[in-house]
Image (tube, rainbow, N blue to C red):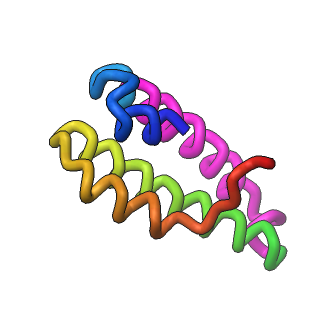
């Protein structure tokens, strides 16, 4: 992930912030599409997916804020709280 590269000093804060802003925009577009359909929200899986997207947006926003403050400890804390699996 781009944030790992920032933590290791491989990319700039500006580059990382721009990438995170784009990711946040894409997640929000997907979340908006999910919440626009009452049929999906009625379904338990659709509602759970919309909730997960909202949580991920909040996490991305917090990571973006921490990167902009150059607060690597806050970035690491936020990353540790995201329940994801790395690609194998």
Whether residue 17 is visible, yes or no, is no
Rendered position, 88 above or below 80: above
Corner quadrant of residue 20: top left
* Residue 57 in magenta stretch: no
Q: Tell whether 13 sits left or right of 49.
A: left
Rendered position, 47 above or below 25: below
Please identify the dominant SS of the magenta region.
Answer: helix
- The magenta segment is 17-42
* Residue 37 in magenta stretch: yes
Corner quadrant of residue 14: top left
Q: How many marks?
A: 0
Residue in the foreground of this view, choosing between 76 and 32: 76
Residue in view at x 25 percent, y 46 percent: 65
| Residue 72 drawn at (x, y percent) | 26, 49
Whether residue 22 is visible, yes or no, is yes
Residue in the foreground of this view, choosing between 10 and 64: 10
Rendered position, 3 above or below 48: above
Residue in view at x 39 percent, y 25 percent: 10
Corner quadrant of residue 40: bottom right
Residue in view at x 37 percent, y 36 percent: 8
* Image quarter hosting the N terminus: top right
| Residue 75 drawn at (x, y percent) | 33, 53
| Residue 13 drawn at (x, y percent) | 28, 27
Q: Residue furthest bottom?
A: 44
Rendered position, 21 above or below 82: above
Q: Tell whether 26 sits left or right of 43.
A: left
| Residue 27 drawn at (x, y percent) | 58, 44
Q: Tell whether 45 sits left or right of 29.
A: right
């Amino acid at each position: 992930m781009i944030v790992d590269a920032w933590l290791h000093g491989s990319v700039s804060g500006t580059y990382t912030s721009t990438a995170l802003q784009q990711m946040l925009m894409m997640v929000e577009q997907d979340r908006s599409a999910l919440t626009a359909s009452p049929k999906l929200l009625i379904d338990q899986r659709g509602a759970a997916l919309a909730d997960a997207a909202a949580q991920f947006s909040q996490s991305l926003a917090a990571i973006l804020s921490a990167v902009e403050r150059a607060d690597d400890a806050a970035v690491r804390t936020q990353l540790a709280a995201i329940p994801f699996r790395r690609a194998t």
